[in-house]
Amino acid sequence: MAAQVMLTPVTLIILGIFLAACSGVPGLFLQRGTGQGQKIATFSLLAGALSASIGAIQVIRTNLTEIYTSGWRLPFGAGELGVDPLSALFLLVIFLVATCAAVYALGYWPAAKNPCTERRLSLFFGLLTASLALLVLARDAITFLMAWEVMAISCYFAMTVESQRTEVRDAGTLYMVATHTATLALFAMFALLQAQTGSFSFPTAHSLNSQTSVAAAIFITACIGFGLKGGLMPLHIWLPSAHASAPSHVSALMSGVLIKTGIYGMIRLLTFFQLPPLWWGIFLLIAGCISAVMGVAFALGQHDLKRLLAYHSIENVGIITIGLGVALIGQATGNIPVTILGIAGSLLHVVNHALFKSLLFLGAGSVIHATGTREIDSLGGLARSMPYTAFYFLLGAAAICGLPPLNGFVSEYLIYLGLFGGITGGTGADIFFLALAAPALALVGGLAVACFIKVYGATFLGHPKTKSPLAAAEGAWQMLAPMGVLTVFCIGIGLVPQLLADFLLAPIAVFAPGQVIGSRGFLTLAPLAWISVLAAVLIALTVLLTGLFLLRCRNMPSHQSVTWDCGYLQTTSRIQYTASSFAEMLVKLLSGVLRPRYQQPQLKAIFSGPASFASHLPEALLDLVIAPFFRSIDERFSLLRRVQHGQLHLYIFYVFATLVALLVWSI
């Protein structure tokens, strides 16, 4: 009996969270620089991930839903933890990405080369993983906010481990301002929920009326709080600099998992309400379209490899939000197939984005580790010296572009089916917005392809543009193995997506109870088996054509010759397309929104000597709106600084004068 209690899914999940939280503690007491603490932390996190993943899989397979109330009292009531298939799905994503990132860190951030920072990074990486997992188990406002705050602080210390760099400190400050602004919005949201329910415990699923003004206020504050954490445009201002400045394996966890807590929080909140109003779905649909289109547009003009990937996180959060908006529109209009397809596409894209975006960030980390630069225009030709990284990055790029036969195509396919189902089965204003969202999603896919052709070609193809990529070498096996694992998942989901049907149905039932039609009915709505057939045909055709080409080349006489060199006697990397020149046309086409800045060469004579050209794409909202606003506020309030003389007796006088004024006012 005791053994059965120890092996319950909830016990396994709690054990996994505990092992993750404590993973970095032993290293604090071991000798610095030996690597023993880092190995113990990695092993502990791996064990915790295995335990929690087994428990999460059991929860999904048995459709288990349980809530536990703690015996100790929080300031506003007892703490509550719970697990259901929706939480379990996010737990699987959290621990898979965290495991890959932790193993990757052994080669990317070894203790021997980083003795001053490794212990801190291992400690806060484990705490970040544990707080992410605890967050999705929270079933009351206080526990949720406590886990939310631990997540925010541990992420701050993990991403600012190189605090000697000014850009890292600035990115950390901006992140803390944004995350605590999100926390303030969540304070308001939970206060409104408490006013409506009379308790800080999460209400019973689908028990609240969504047609009241209080419900509308809860929805709006949730969109602000969770949208800030998720990086939904225009609430994304912290995300590009934070992802770019953090160590690459931390960036993978932030992009693959941390920003998904905003998506999780939004989905969990929506399960509290009964039939949602139509405008909720339309609002999320529009917000998702804006974030997706503008995210990929800003990515096109980036020169920094990790900032480019960060903007694609904004794009994919937008795609996830589009799916969520489709599901809400389906609920509001009573269209069950649209509801199921929308939420299925949204949840599956949460999983898929975690896989391919973590893969891309780890690939970018390998490039930075080998070359010492994130500047795309300084790279080139890395496929020769880093073939495995080039292959993994190529597959990740194809997956994020939604190309078959990889996993990104499957989730976007489900969202497209939901959009088209809503268009053909709709009867009101929802048709107009769904009809606009479909081409917007197609535009996103096209721009994403252009962007990754740019980044892959400029980084891995051609000739090196500077001396630093010449000495680039492939990373250690600890860096390559996690990328290989993520690649296998990307390929597997793309080839046999129908195997995920059972795993998706249980979380869908949490969002839309009573509307799930079984795995056979789901596969009728979304004929995923055809994706496997088409993928097999595509692979077979590719192999056949490649074989025919090689056979033809073998049978044809060959001779060597130089290609037409446009009059240049010797080729040079200076005549190659750079990432900036490749994207110039699209950036200029979108210049009204992107607001690019150019530094033109000054030619004062016919033979003026060397000249240079530079372009920069600012963070439009932050650099052109928010920062100038706060600078103007600072200038207007600068006169108040004159009262701060630094003399204690003057401050005592200020306190005395204030007290006298208050006494006079109260008479």
Image (cartoon, rainbow, N blue to C red):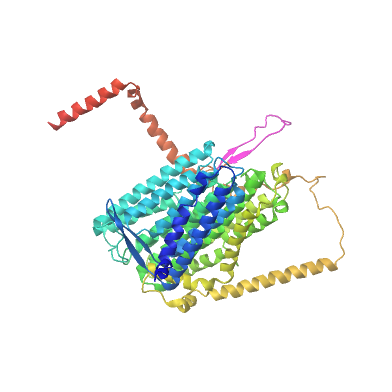
Residue 485 in view: yes
Residue 436 in view: no
Q: Does residue 374 appear to the left or right of 221 in the view shown?
A: right
* Residue 174 position in % (x across, y down): 45, 41
Q: Is residue 599 magenta?
A: yes
Q: Is residue 420 magenta?
A: no
* View extreme (bottom): residue: 520
* Residue 219 position in % (x across, y down): 33, 57
* Residue 217 position in % (x across, y down): 30, 54
Which image quadrant for residue 433?
A: bottom left
Region rendered in magenta? 596-615
Q: Does residue 640 appear to the left or right of 577 in the view shown?
A: left
Which image quadrant for residue 449?
A: bottom right
Q: Give the total number of marks visible in the rendering.
A: 0
* View extreme (left): residue: 667
Q: Nearer the viewer, residue 651 or 540?
A: 651
Give the vertical position of 659 relative to 57 (above or below): above
Give the vertical position of 351 relative to 636 (above or below): below
Give the vertical position of 252 relative to 418 (above or below): above
Q: Does residue 358 appear to the left or right of 437 in the view shown?
A: right
Q: Nearer the viewer, residue 372 or 522?
A: 372
Q: Residue at x 60, y 40 (%)?
A: 615
* Residue 344 position in % (x across, y down): 46, 68
Q: Nearer the viewer, residue 290 or 82?
A: 82
Q: Quadrant of the N terminus?
A: bottom left
